[in-house]
Structures are given as structure tokens and as C-alpha cells.
Amino acid sequence: MKLKIIALFLKQGLLSLQSLVIKISTMKLKQVASIKAGYPFRGKIQAINEIDPCKTNPNYPHALAIQMKNVTLKRGIDWSSCIKTQLMGKRSPAWLQPGDILFTARGSHNYAILIDHSIAKQHAVAAPHFYVIQLQTSEVLPGYLAWLLNQSPCQRYFQREAEGSFAKSIRRQILDNTPIVQPSLSEQKNIIGLIRTLKQEQQIMEKLIDNGERFMHGIANQLFAKTSNKEKIIQKKLNNTKE
């Protein structure tokens, strides 16, 4: 797998010294994107069937609420675990769109999750623990930016700038000033293609490992089954001898 990745890098020209020097520009995140806090829910987010009927209002929209427990860096958003709720506030919701990026503002690990086309036509909002990043330029691709925010240079920046003694958090200003690098669009597309290839290989490896573990469990079960059968045969012979 490592050889394949290196071959892709060489083929796509990502290791070209000239491209690194000439085509890459450095800037702050706020120069290419707008950043807003998630929807301002008040208190616990409740599923529609848990809300007091006296407090519901047919004029308020229904929406899927994305919470911290619904996302992981590895798997992205688990839409099936998101609850559907009613937005009670007077503020008009800004529905999440493909290409938006969710950034986890609280906790010891701050990472970015790309909203892809799996959101389809669902009305969804992010909990206030997230920042919603929306690109304001076509010169930076959402998939590239989400990947970049999760890489070690940005992660070191977040770790250094996070505030709080026990519960760490990233303020809006800190996220605004996150340093980012912008290679050419073609190189961004190459990086995104490489990310997809790597994910596919990881999925294949995980499947192989899972199949291997199941195979070994099967061997263990067969061994115990054989042992159990032998014990039954011995016990039967002993009973026959006694008779």
C-alpha cells in the first residue's frame, strides 16, 4: 500500500519542488471562508416525539440535528444516529449544504468533517459545539480544506492555541486565524483523489482483517466443539462400563 501511495505522489507531481515553491500560497482561514457557530439550541436537543406538545409550533421547521456523538473523524457523519427535532428559535436556520465543513470546537481533539452529497435534500443543522465553515472562493476545494485542517501543522496550531484548564476549546478568532496553504486547483484535486484511494485501501484492509478474525474465531469454536465431543464419548464409555 505504501508503494502505491508513493507511486501516486510521483505520478501526480505532488513532490515537485517547483510546484511547492511557485504554486503554493499561504493565508489565514478567514480570508477564504466564513465561519459561524452551529444552531443555538437551548438546553438538551430533543427528538420530536420527546418534545412537550404544548411547546411545539407547526410554523417551526423540523430538522436533523448533528451532535458530537454523531460524528467521528474516521467515519464522518452517521446520519442514521442523528435525531430529528423541531427548531424552536426565531432565528431562520441556515441549512447545511454539500461542501460545508463542520469543525469540532470543544474537546482535546479538534477536527474537521466535510458535508458531502450524502446529505441529499435533508434539512440539517449543526449543534452549537460545532463551527460551520463555508468557503467563499472557488480557488479552494472543500475536500482539500477539510483534509488540511486535520493534518499535523493545523493540529499543532489548535493544540497550542486551545483555551481552558479542563475542557479545552477553540475560540472563533483562533479558527479565523488558522494558517492554511493553497496549492493550485489541480494539485488540490490530486490530493483529494489520493485521499479517496487511501480510504478505499483502508476499507479493504479492514475487511480483510475482519474476515481473518472471523476465520480464527471459527477455528477456536471448532476446537472447543471437538473437545466437547470427545468428552461426551469418554463419558458415555464410562457410563457403559459401570452398567
Image: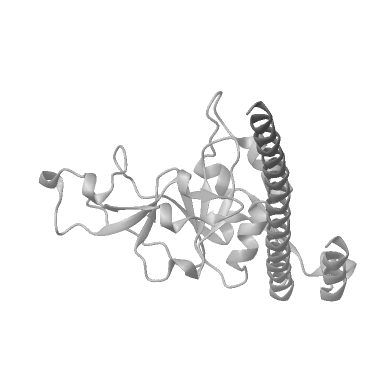
Residue 59: % across, % down: 15, 59
Looking at the image, residue 227 sits to the left or right of residue 131; the answer is: right
- Can residue 23 be seen in the rendering of this structure? yes
- Can residue 88 be seen in the rendering of this structure? no
Residue pushed farthest front? 243
Looking at the image, residue 50 sits to the left or right of residue 241; the answer is: left
| Quadrant hosting residue 155 | top right
- Which residue sits at x=65%, y=58%? 147
Looking at the image, residue 154 sits to the left or right of residue 117; the answer is: right
Residue pushed farthest left? 54
Q: Is residue 144 above or below residue 46?
A: below
- Which residue sits at x=34%, y=63%? 123
Residue pushed farthest top? 165
Q: Looking at the picture, tell me which residue is in the foreground, 83 or 63.
A: 83
- The scheme the figure's colours follow is one colour
Residue 32: % across, % down: 57, 62
Q: Looking at the picture, tell me which residue is in the foreground, 94 or 57.
A: 57
